[in-house]
Image: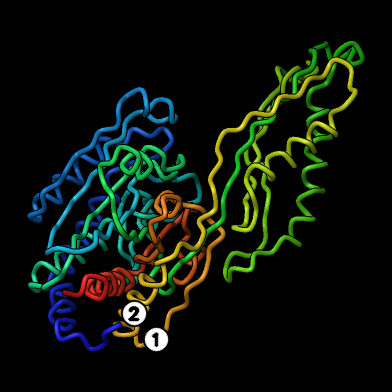
């Protein structure tokens, strides 16, 4: 990897010259809600496309067919692509998502206010991952402004369904052949390169019994009592997952969480139906089919032989872990070299226990990493929590690093 690239200074100057505009661009993205669910995200995409066109980009709008959107549990989604061809050479896709989880409670700042306090912008999606709409767009602008002579094409993939799995975002763009990149960089944080991530399995468990008056509970079949038995078995099982530790630094161990539960009719009625959802995080070394079979067997064994009770298990989501793909080292080298130039430090290449759209690229054999604007950990950014925030300085750093990394990847 070439250090002290002569054009580095011009590119960094170009980033800084547009930085106020970049911060306002990000603020505009945060102020426009794009919560998913409910997943009515086409309006945000339309606004974003207009902002990008005002910067001089040619923006492709790819609305996802209505039936496909509804099947994913969303209302509307339009994916955006920008393609800038510098010359003959590989195609590098930069992917970030504009849909966000709902704000929830506990905020001390307006979640759609994009308020800046002590050098930090607050708002839902400011770190995960509307910030990287700004990172990638303004990195590309800096390359254009500096007149970088590169051999290849940079594409921005700005999508809207990461919070529901990514299948109608990057999955749809790649599956339809709309883009065929040679490399991919997905939204991440500025002080490390992510090379692998966990997989995820969501299962719905529905326990059905028979209602009865609370004065005569023995005449019914209590679905909640049985659900409690199954939940106890699952939580006992969860303790053992701490021993399933990944060999990839940063991943940690496998995990399980029950995040939703619903059921019952009224306080004075024996519950006839209770359902809950399991989130099972899989380390890269685990096989999704084996993990699902293990959980189904556990539920079935716990529920055996109870009169009047039936239990159904339905798969809601399965996400394969993101694994290392040959060629990924080229991306890591480009980003770490650029980060050394900008930060003056060596950033680590490791895994993360979350899952994201990046695996949709790596599943197709495309070398992929995560890198973008943000702190050293998700917890520092309050990602998916109240008072999500981004240090403005991290946006500046990441934009310079991405722009310089692209010069390393696409050196003429």
Measured as percent of width and height from the top left, residue 153 is found at 18, 60
Left or right of 158: which side holds 39?
Answer: right
Look at 31% across and 52% down and name the residue there: 113
Left or right of 325: which side holds 202?
Answer: right
157 up-or-down from 122: above or below: above
Look at 36% across and 55% down and name the residue there: 129
Looking at the image, which is closer to me, 208 or 222?
208
Secondary structure at badge 2 equals helix
Look at 31% across and 35% down and name the residue there: 77
Measured as percent of width and height from the top left, residue 388 is found at 43, 57
CA gap between label 1 and label 2 equals 7 Å
Of the residues under marks 1 and 2, which one precedes in the sequence?
A: 2
Looking at the image, which is closer to me, 376 or 404?
404
Left or right of 323: which side holds 135?
Answer: left
Measured as percent of width and height from the top left, residue 71 is found at 43, 26
Look at 37% across and 77% down and name the residue there: 333
Which quadrant, please, contains the C terminus? bottom left
Using a 10 Å C-alpha cutoff, classify the residue at mark 1 as few (fewer than 14 neighbours), some (14 to 19) or many (20 or more).
Answer: few
Secondary structure at badge 1 equals loop
Label 1 sits on residue = 345
Q: How many marks?
A: 2
Label 2 sits on residue = 339
Measured as percent of width and height from the top left, residue 354 is found at 53, 56
Left or right of 40: which side holds 237?
Answer: right
Asked if labels 2 and 1 touch by Cβ distance under 8 angstroms, the answer is: yes
């Amino acid at each position: 990897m070439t250090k002290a690239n002569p054009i580095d200074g011009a590119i960094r100057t170009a980033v800084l010259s547009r930085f106020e505009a970049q911060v306002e661009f990000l603020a505009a993205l945060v102020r426009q809600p794009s919560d998913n669910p409910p997943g009515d995200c086409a309006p945000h995409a339309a606004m974003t496309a207009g902002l990008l066109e005002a910067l001089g980009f040619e923006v492709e709008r790819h609305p996802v067919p209505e039936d496909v959107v509804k099947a994913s549990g969303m209302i509307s989604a339009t994916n955006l692509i920008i393609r800038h061809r510098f010359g003959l050479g590989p195609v590098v896709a930069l992917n970030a998502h504009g849909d966000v989880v709902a704000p929830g409670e506990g905020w001390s700042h307006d979640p759609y206010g994009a308020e800046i306090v002590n050098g930090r912008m607050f708002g839902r999606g400011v770190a995960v991952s509307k910030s990287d709409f700004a990172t990638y767009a303004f990195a590309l602008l800096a390359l254009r402004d500096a007149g970088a002579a590169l051999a290849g094409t940079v594409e921005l993939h700005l999508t809207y369904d990461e919070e529901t799995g990514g299948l109608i975002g990057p999955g749809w763009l790649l599956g339809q052949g709309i883009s065929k990149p040679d490399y991919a960089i997905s939204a991440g944080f500025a002080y490390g390169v992510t090379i692998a991530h966990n997989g995820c399995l969501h299962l719905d468990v529905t326990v059905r019994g028979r209602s009865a008056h609370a004065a005569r509970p023995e005449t019914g079949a209590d679905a909640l009592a049985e659900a409690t038995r199954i939940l106890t078995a699952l939580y006992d099982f969860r303790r053992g997952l701490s021993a399933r530790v990944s060999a990839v630094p940063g991943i940690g161990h496998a995990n399980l969480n029950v995040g939703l539960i619903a059921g019952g009719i009224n306080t004075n009625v024996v519950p006839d139906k209770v359902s809950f959802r399991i989130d099972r995080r899989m380390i890269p070394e685990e096989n999704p089919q084996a993990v699902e079979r293990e959980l189904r067997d556990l539920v079935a064994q716990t529920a055996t032989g109870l009169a009047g009770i039936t239990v159904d298990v339905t798969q809601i989501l399965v996400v394969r872990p993101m694994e290392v793909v040959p060629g990924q080292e080229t991306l890591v080298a480009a980003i770490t070299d650029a980060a050394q130039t900008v930060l003056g430090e060596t950033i680590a290449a490791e895994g993360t226990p979350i899952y994201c759209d990046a695996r949709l690229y790596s599943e197709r054999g495309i070398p992929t990493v995560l890198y973008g604007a943000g702190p050293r950990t998700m917890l520092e950014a309050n990602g998916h929590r109240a008072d999500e925030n981004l240090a403005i300085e991290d946006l500046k750093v990441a934009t310079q690093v991405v722009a310089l990394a692209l010069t390393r990847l696409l050196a003429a």
